[in-house]
Image (cartoon, rainbow, N blue to C red):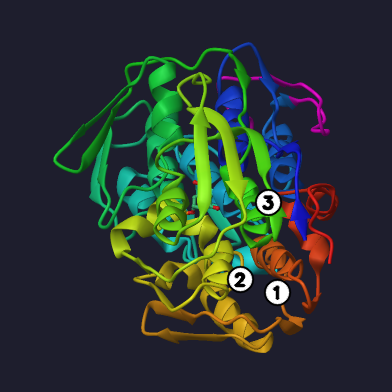
Amino acid sequence: MKIGGAIRVPGDKSITQRALLLAALGGGTSTLRGALSSLDTRAAARVLRSLGAGVSPLRDGRVVRVAGRRRFAPPPSALDCRNSGTVARLLLGLLAAHPFSALVTGDRSLRRRPMGRVTEPLAAMGARFEGDAGHLPIRIRGGALRPLRCQLPVSSAQLKSALFLAGVAGAVPVAVREPEGRSRDHTERMLRAFGYSVTEDGGWIAFEPDGRLSSFDFTVPGDFSSAIFLAGAAVLAEAGSLRITGVGLNPTRTGALQVLGRMGAQLAAEPMADVLGEPAGDLVVAPSALIGTTVGAGEIPGLIDEIPMLAVLASRASGHTTFRHVGELRVKESNRLALIADNLRAVGGRAEVCGDDLHVDGTDRPPRGRVRTDGDHRIAMAFSVLGTLRGARIAVDDPDCAAVSYPGFASALRAVGGRR
Ligand code: S3P
């Protein structure tokens, strides 16, 4: 396959969701340009409308306007976050400070994911939960909150952000410490842009409720976690080069660049101006012969969503690749850890899970077989990229689930040359 041209990927999912939530809780009308329009972000918009905010339709290429409400109104029905862990967890944080009862739920995959990591510290702040608060559906009743200082059980941006957003909505200080590596810091950057102090000292990240959410006009950069799939296709290609333009290059998101660099990938980031505190630029990628590497536990939070693509690339590298301490992948949109290993084996590769580590051996045999996604968008996209190799015969059971984060992924892959 020959790769070529320049392409833009859709807006960043994490940043779009945070911008929607903060705009809905702010005053006045905010404007979002380049926002992601996907199943996950549309779920966020629907939930915010039920809480009284005005959110214009999310459509590809359309500017989104959000009329904020300062305080949310009691929702008329259950708040369905569909497949989105970010929406569910950040929303629980915001609801913790609202004096009404709300039922938060999601699809089958989201109802399986752990929520106790969020509801326990929120309960310590003063939120009340009815029944089992370990899994959705969860009924929360918020109210006046107490300050929180909390050592987090996992390095998770969703957890950290939920607690900071409770601090914003409840006007109380919140300090957290992550155990291993730094998770993405979009929330911290946005809160600083609203004048809040968010400081770091000895591993503690401390938020003070000294800012104010005002309306804003914001351009969302492209999603690095979507760009990685096209970059993966370019690395596996036989000739050409690909430019992916306007991608978010926040250093807490781009750990995959260092790993791919160690593996021998020809991949360069060309940073441009920051967009409201978020670095962005172009990625330029060329076909490359890869070698195996070890990805350390401290690197994992910075590339958590890129592991499906990295593992697939590792299956085409010479030698052995180990991803250490990736147990968190068991509680993503699917049991992603098991699915990566099972699917690599299903297409003729060698991969195994030992404890919390993932081991992958490279091969140059054409990959052939059936891939089970369990509706996980990143599994679908990673194995679709593997299917672009010469001689590959891969059947992905649900390629359309890519629309959770990257609507139009299949045509983007074809456009850059990734046909079989
Ligand atoms: C996200 C954080 C990550 C990531 C998810 C989006 C976010 O989850 O996997 O896709 O927007 O904060 P964790 O923070 O739970 O690791």
Residue 82 in view of the camera: no
Quarter in which the N terminus is drawn: bottom right
Q: Residues within 10 Å of mark 1 (few under 14, many from 20)?
A: some
Q: Residues within 10 Å of mark 3 (few under 14, many from 20)?
A: many
Q: Secondary structure at mark 2?
A: loop
User: Is residue 367 left or right of 301 when viewed as pictured?
Assistant: right
Residue 202 at x, y percent in the picture: 14, 41
Towards the viewer: 55 or 7: 7
Q: Secondary structure at mark 3?
A: helix
Q: Is residue 65 magenta?
A: yes
Q: Which residues are magenta?
A: 55-74
Q: Is mark 2 within 8 Å of ligand 1?
A: no
Q: Main secondary structure of the magenta part?
A: loop
Q: Residues within 10 Å of mark 2 (few under 14, many from 20)?
A: many
Q: Give above or below for 347 relative to 141.
A: below
Residue 226 at x, y percent in the picture: 64, 48
User: Is residue 295 left or right of 404 when viewed as pictured?
Assistant: left
Q: Which mark is residue 230?
A: 3
Q: Secondary structure at mark 1?
A: loop
Instruction: Tell me the distance, in whole angstroms, between the alpha carbons under discs 3 and 2.
Output: 22 Å
The quadrant holding residue 303 is bottom left
Q: Amino acid at mark 1?
A: Asp
Q: Is tag 3's residue or tag 2's residue first in the polypeptide sequence?
A: 3
Residue 68 at x, y percent in the picture: 63, 20
Which residue is at a point 48% across and 79% down the rendered structure image? 360
